[in-house]
Amino acid sequence: MKKKNRIILLGAPAILVLFTVLKLADNKDTIDQRAEHALQQQVFDRIPVKTVAATMQATSNTLSLTGTFAPQQDLQLTAQAQGQVNTLFVKEGQFVQKGTLLAAIDNSALASQIAAARTALDNAEQDAQRMRNAFSTGGVTQQDVENAGLKARNAKSTLAQLQQQEANYRVTAPVSGVVNKIFAEQGSFVSPGTAVLQLVDITRVVLNVAVDQVYVPLLKPGMAVKVSSEVYPGVDLKGRVETVNVQADASQKITVGVYVDNSREHPLLGGMFGRADFNFSGADTLKSALTIPRAALVGSVQAPEVFVVKADSTVDLRAIRVEQSLGKVVHVTEGLAAGEQVVTAGQINLEEGTRVTVKN
């Protein structure tokens, strides 16, 4: 019995030692986990980003812009009188000269009025002549002659007014062009303002492009522009500046119209895409501008902001002013200085004051 108790007493120190070892091992795991968590938290607090320095660059003396060709004139001709379309003299796709009769509207009622007015004028002129003859023999007074002459003049004025109305029953081509679309069928009824057909003048086409304001002072009427279209690869067409809008659009750009004479060899149609290549090499040297990549912008060109990396590795969300945007580069006029580092990738995870790690 005593021997058994002694065995139990000898086992107690071993259990205590084992418990201590296990406790120390558990504490070590806890310390390691906390250290790893702290390290992860430290890494997470620094967002990896890419940056680029704002730099001063000279504005290019060449400019290449894309746009859409439009006809020189695109006219929708409407009826000026009420009636039935008696005859259509043209077909879609037909080229017509200026002044060509395109459609005729029934004017039978007006024709009757004109015939009656012409008869009334003949009678009034005959009466006036008889009065003048009678006055020479003393048969009528001067007042009678004047009244007869007045009636003749009124009859002539009435006929002229009706004849002017007669032109409203004819639809004629105000310019030379192609009948692109016919809206009214022969025999259909039209009223004033009803569309009859569309006439398009493509003897010249205009390529409308949006130009940044900095180039506007260099654009002169008649300035030569090289024009091309993907429809005719390798073919350069001669264009010239003819129109410059006087008001900028929402993106602060000005619409410029470059006109090109059409040709049978390389016909340009409305809606085709084209490219205008401007060359300002003969103009005064353009000013230098502070440039950054367009990818650095947060928001739109109308209300742009950028994240600027400060010396303490935190970022500052700063509003800037952009003068123009040329492809992947924008010119900055306010809010940024040359040499400042702007974030170009990783902005989605940033906010004011976030610490970053630059990974260029």
Image (spheres, rainbow, N blue to C red):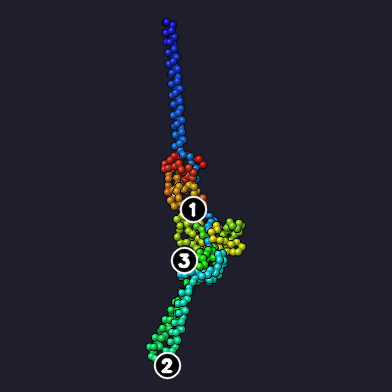
**Could you say where residue 159 lies in the image, as x and y percent from the top left?**
45, 79
Q: Tag 2's secondary structure?
A: helix
Amino acid tagged 3: Thr
Q: Tag 3's secondary structure?
A: loop
Count of labels shown? 3
* Residue at 45% from the left image edge and 36% from the top image edge: 44
* Residue at 49% from the left image edge and 66% from the top image edge: 188
Marks 3,1: beta carbons within 8 A? no
Nearer-the-camera pick, 81 or 42: 81
**Could you say where residue 131 lies in the image, as x and y percent from the top left?**
42, 89
Q: Quadrant of residue 35?
A: top left
Please give the residue where the numbered disc 3 appears in the rendered image: 194
Please give the residue where the numbered disc 2 appears in the rendered image: 136
Please give the residue where the numbered disc 1 appears in the rendered image: 325
Nearer-the-camera pick, 192 or 39: 192
In the rendered view, does 37 fall on the left or right side of 64?
left
Closer to the observer: label 3 or label 2? 3
Q: In this rendering, is residue 254 above or below 78? A: above
Amino acid tagged 2: Ser
**Could you say where residue 337 lies in the image, as x and y percent from the top left?**
45, 48
Q: Tag 1's secondary structure?
A: strand
Closer to the observer: label 3 or label 1? 3
Mark 2: few/some/many CA within 10 Å (<14, 14-19, 20+): few
Nearer-the-camera pick, 353 or 245: 245
